Image: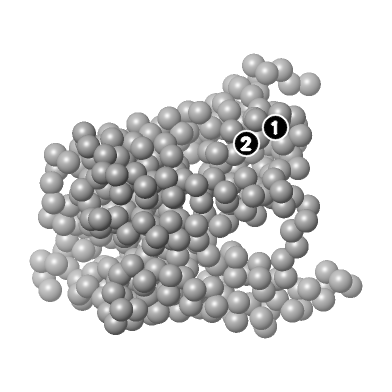
Amino acid sequence: MSVDPINLLAFLGMAIVTYVTRVAGLALAGRLSLSPRAQAAFDAIPPAVLIAVIAPSALATGWAETAAAAITALAATRLPLLGVVAVGVVAVVGFRIVM
Amino acid sequence: MSTMRDDIRRGLNDIWPAAVAAAPIGLLFGAVAASKGLSPLEVFLMSIMVFAGGAQFAAIEMWASPAPVAALVFSTLLINARHVLMGASLAPKLQGFSRWQKFLGLYYMADENWALAEKRARTHRLTPAYWFAMVIPFVTGWLINSTLGAMIGAVLGDPKRLGADFAFTALFIALVAAFWKGRVTFWTVAAAGIASAVTYRLVGPPWHVAAGALCGLLAAWLAAGGEAQPATEEVKA
């Protein structure tokens, strides 16, 4: 069981910024009024970041991954979270065999 | 009037379905973290210090040796920025909390327990007993499952063999569906995906995350322009 010091530094940095986001609301309560456009941009943060993280794996790795990502997106309109993950994993294994 | 014991029982009752749903996700997180070279102890430390599923998954996807600390912290900040709005909405409902209960309790505010607390506050006074009865088992479950996943993952070996490396991509696509809000989300996803993939090819990691995220936000801001204006007028009128 080892702990790399640089990894620990990363955990610490992640923990600090996360805690700041969690308590910042205490100071802002009742004083926060975003324009509808700013609100839309704020609401878009989670999907924008999630897609930015996976885009290389989905779009810039190979046709098997891109095809599996398309099937996964289709499944995401119908199935619960773990069902979608299962479909995606099975699809990528299948496409890697045939492509 | 609800007693402390009632509030504890109610909190446990409300959180358990979310805790059960999070269990396999915790196992998956630990297993893929192990495939990136993190030890079970490191997975435990990350989970207890950060406790933010989406940000932790994104971090593991970007993980390298040595860890790209600045990029990891920036991505974590972006993903968790939504907490500011969640906290601002929850803060006025924490009147029964002492100062230290607020600062301690909010350390582990996550999407699930925040949503349940908001729901509870609509009909009852939100008490520390209810909050901590939800949060303690939820956090404990995430710690146990992610650490256990790392132990199992270390034994399973190369995740690519089982397609497990793609589990992240699939999980994130599923999570985006949960955040779906129609046209604006479509443009967000299209802009973020293209900008990220292009940046990844031309510049390389970890810059694709910041470039993709910022283009996605810009697209959302632009796409919301047309439909947001009438909504403001309605509110004013």
Residue B171 found in image quarter: bottom left
What amino acid type should be assigned to the residue bearing mark 2? Phe
Give the image location of residue B65, x and y in percent. 23, 55
Q: Secondary structure at mark 1?
A: helix
Query: Can residue B213 be seen?
Result: yes
Classify 10 Å Cα crowding around label 1: few (below 14), some (14-19), many (20 and above).
Answer: few
Instruction: Give yes or no for contact between labels 2 and 1 (Cβ–Cβ under 8 Å).
Output: yes
The residue shown at (64%, 16%) is: B5
Location of the N terminus of chain A (image quadrant): top left
Q: Which residue is mark 1?
A: B99
Query: Is B33 left, or right, of A12 in this rendering?
Result: left
The residue shown at (28%, 74%) is: B204
Q: Nearer the viewer, residue B196 or B164?
A: B196
Give the image location of residue B228, x and y in percent. 70, 76
Q: In the image as oriented, which residue stretches furthest toward the right?
A: B237
Q: Which chain does the numbered disc 1 sit on?
A: B
Residue B103 shows which numbered tag?
Answer: 2
What amino acid type should be assigned to the residue bearing mark 1? Arg
Q: Nearer the viewer, residue B113 or A4?
A: A4
